Image: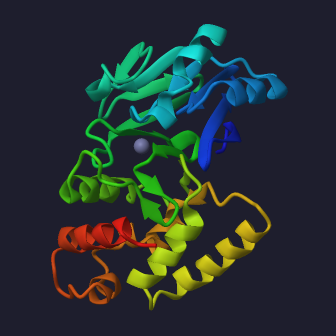
Amino acid sequence: MARFEIERVPVLEDNYVWLVHEPAANVTAVIDPAVAEPVLAAAQRRGWTITHILNTHHHPDHVGGNLEIKRASGCTIVGPSHDRERIPGLDVEVSDGDAYAFGAETGEVFFVPGHTRGHIAYWFGGSDALFCGDTLFILGCGRLFEGTPEQMWKSLSRLRKLPDSTRIYCAHEYTQSNARFALTVDPANDDLKARAAEIDRLRARGEATVPGTMGEERRTNPFLRADHPGVANAVGLAGAEPVKVFAEVRRRKDTFR
Ligand SMILES: [Zn+2]
């Protein structure tokens, strides 16, 4: 396990770009480069040559560095077929169920619409790594810009079936505000309370909270727990269908301050 060497590159306000090195084949992918310069600099510091960009969706803070990194490195850009017109420099289109070979590792592609209509995630089971863009955050999920609650609940329900040990490499450090919100919709969850306290300690020291693990998320992320009675009760929807509970939790988060 954990064949990948992964470097976190913090950029812009709260984005994380991930540099993923597969040492056996000496290939390096950039996940969702918001910008180019700090990513190129980080790769150079590690002595890694960028060979791939893997995009999850088309938002500018995920593809903004595509063309400049491609010019500098000649890398191959991989992204969702549903978004072929919206991904700058796209070379290889992938879609749900595809197995994408990256060096000695293989990434399974999940079509996870909701945040955008074309969003995908890459799961590398051999390295226990999930690159999920803006679909799943630590203790949160992406806003529904182009999708419905039904789509997002289905997408998250697929991701939460991944093994407990799966590390979640999402694209933003939103965890502390997500935790404050989560406590309002899952107030009786002791695992969540303990985790929120730990997150406050980490952030007070200026440390990152990403990646987290799927096991932790299943116990504490309210967007993965819309079928748990504690969450349904807390939003006044005891006994309702999980998708209704999910929609209400997402609606509340949209206006949470
Ligand atoms: Zn986005």
Q: Quadrant of residue 51?
A: top right
Q: Residue at x 65, y 11 (%)?
A: 73
Above or below residue 57? Residue 74 is: above
Residue 238 in which image quadrant = bottom left
Which residue occupies the foreground of this view, 156 or 257?
Answer: 257
Residue 256 appears left or right of 151: right
Residue 22 in sight in this render: no
Q: How many marks?
A: 0
Q: Position of residue 235 (x, y in %)?
A: 28, 84
Identify the residue at horizontal 47%, vertical 86% (top origin).
189
- Along the line of sight, the residue nearer the viewer: 105 or 234: 234
Question: What is the x, y in percent for residue 239?
Answer: 17, 86
| Residue located 25% across and 73% down the image | 248
Drawn side of residue 136 relative to residue 44, left or right: left
Report the coloring of the rendering. rainbow
Q: Nearer the viewer, residue 220 or 206?
A: 206
The location of residue 185, given as percent across then percent down, is 38, 82
| Residue nearest the viewer, comparing 9 with 75 | 9
Residue 160 shows in the view: yes
Q: Residue at x 40, y 16 (%)?
A: 92
Place of residue 209 in the rendered image (x, y in percent of width and height, measured from the top left): 65, 61
Quadrant position of ligand 1: top left
Q: Is residue 62 left or right of residue 30?
A: left
As drawn, 4 above or below 88:
below
The quarter of the image holding the N terminus is top right
